[in-house]
Amino acid sequence: MKLKRYKDYDWWLIIATLLISVFGAIMIYSASFPLAIDIYDDPSYFFNRQLIWLAIGSILLFFFMHFRYAVLKNLSPLLIIVSILSLVAVLILGTNTRGAVSWISIGPFSVQPAEFVKLAIIIYLAQVYSQKQAYINKFISGVIPPLVVVVFIFLLIMLQPDLGTAAAILMTAGIIVFLSGAKIRHLTVLGILSGGVVTYFALSESYRIERLAAFQDPFETAERASGGAYQLIQAYIAMAHGGLTGAGLGKSVQKMHFLPDPHTDFILAVIAEELGIFGIGFVLICLLTIAWRGILAGIRCDNTFGTLLAFGLVFQLVSQAVINAGAATGLLPITGLPFPFLSYGGSSLLVSLIGIGILASISKDGKRSKREKEATQAA
């Protein structure tokens, strides 16, 4: 009888998530041990910390898959208030890392509030727009009010500054507005405004301009001390070394202090170098499975809030993975966004696993609702 309680859970979604998360931890160890030895004299330093976050995240995943996601509707205003307070707190109490104040230290660990804000924004927008369906075609009263909150949060994140995360939040907000049923002309106006704002900030700092130059021609700009160009060239070398089959697990050359951030922003390059097309293929299969099951959960859901929430969560995960992969391969400018489930970092991993737990809850309720409807019709 107890086993029947679990038949409604989407085990494809859950297993794919756990597989890619465990794989990520293994690759973090492989990619980080040279750096960990040099800095901490402990090859397992980053790996051990990631395992702690993975254990906590797994507990949260299983908690939220049993949690009734509908309760989040009532919590969304509180989540936004906490998000704003946390972003203000990081500006006051945060730790400056590479010119950005994005982290708050809590004992031996650091937390990045902006990662949790991504989740809060999705819940908030799904809740608000699910209640605005009757007048979603009205720009001023239907579309704009929730976006005022998004813009305020965008500006708070830009004070850190963190354009990658801020732009990702705008993109997720845009997809939720689109799926809510807003008019095309309204979406066009919002798209032009958002694109203009992001472009302005992208060109407002010299280091961002360097990243754009590196994206356009990394070999031309490499000699001008462009960090982005150097990173990208080292990533190219890693991928070329790996080829189709890879050099073998643990046998990356570029992680030996050639490729910066091999366990964070550029972990995909290390995977390609060590495991070749097979490693990248495994990541892709897991990610596509997660996206497929998440979209299916949204389609099967019988209420607008759950559908918008599911699609928002899937878009956030997939778009962040695409942006990270695009940066690592030179198809997109370097943004600093981590690859979900793979890149080292507790905040990103926790948020990703919580998101999967919520998706599993949406999927479970959709299956139960469908079964109850079929039973009612049969009766």
Image: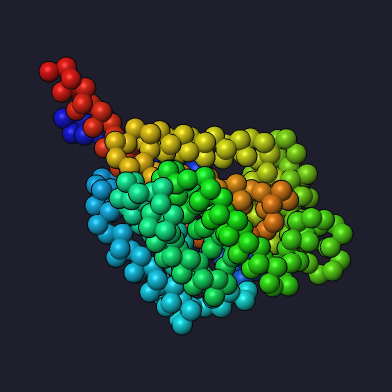
**Numbered-mark total:** 0
- At a point 30% along the width and 50% down the height, the residue shown is 131
- At a point 77% along the width and 45% down the height, the residue shown is 241
Residue 355's place in the image compared with 375, above or below, is below
- Residue furthest out toward the left: 379
Q: Quadrant of the C terminus?
A: top left
**What colour scheme does the image use?**
rainbow
- In-image side of 268 versus 354 (left or right): right
Q: Nearer the viewer, residue 47 or 89?
A: 89
Q: Position of residue 13 (x, y in %)?
A: 41, 37
- At a point 25% along the width and 48% down the height, the residue shown is 70
- Residue furthest out toward the top: 378
- In-image side of 18 versus 326 (left or right): left
Q: Position of residue 331 (x, y in %)?
A: 71, 48
Q: Position of residue 256 (x, y in %)?
A: 71, 59
Residue 246's place in the image compared with 177, above or below, is above
Q: Position of residue 116 (x, y in %)?
A: 42, 61
- In-image side of 97 versus 169 (left or right): right
Residue 125 visible, this angle = no
- At a point 64% along the width and 48% down the height, the residue shown is 325
Q: Quadrant of the N terminus?
A: top left
Residue 223 visible, this angle = yes
